[in-house]
Amino acid sequence: VKMADTTVLKLRPKAPMICHSSDTVLGVSQMLASKRGDAAIITDSSGGLAGIITDTDVTRRVVAKELLPSCTRVSDVMTANPTCVSSSDSATDALVTMVENRFR
């Protein structure tokens, strides 16, 4: 299989971790730690994509600002409306999106 023929779906070994926008940073961080994750997809009240929270978001927007993780909602510190690719997109196109947007 050539890289150009490979889709994002074929690259993703496991399902994403998903949390709700009303969850606390502490709860999401504990879930990520227990599952050895570094990011979670955040959904809104209707189940749609609201954002993403990463370990970097927690470091820069919670810890560095001395916010209490147990009192801070993930909706207040997540990256809202993230750039997305489809599972049917080519892996190459996804990589270009990641590089252009400086995702890690």
Image: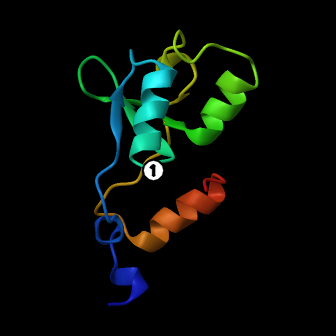
Q: Give above or below for 27 relative to 4.
A: above
The residue drawn where x is 27% and y is 16% is: 45
Dot 1 surroundings within 10 Å: few (below 14), some, or many (20 or more)? Answer: few
The residue drawn where x is 29% and y is 71% is: 10
On screen, residue 96 versus residue 88, left or right, reads right
Q: Position of residue 81 (x, y in %)?
A: 48, 32
Residue 25 or residue 52, whichever sits in front: 25
The residue drawn where x is 39% and y is 19% is: 23
Outermost residue, top side? 71
In the rendered view of the protein, which quadrant contains the C terminus? bottom right
Residue 51 or residue 27, whichever sits in front: 27
Q: Position of residue 69 (x, y in %)?
A: 56, 18
Outermost residue, front side? 34
Q: Position of residue 21 (x, y in %)?
A: 39, 20
Q: Is residue 100 visible?
A: yes
Outermost residue, right side? 64
Q: Amino acid at mark 1?
A: Arg
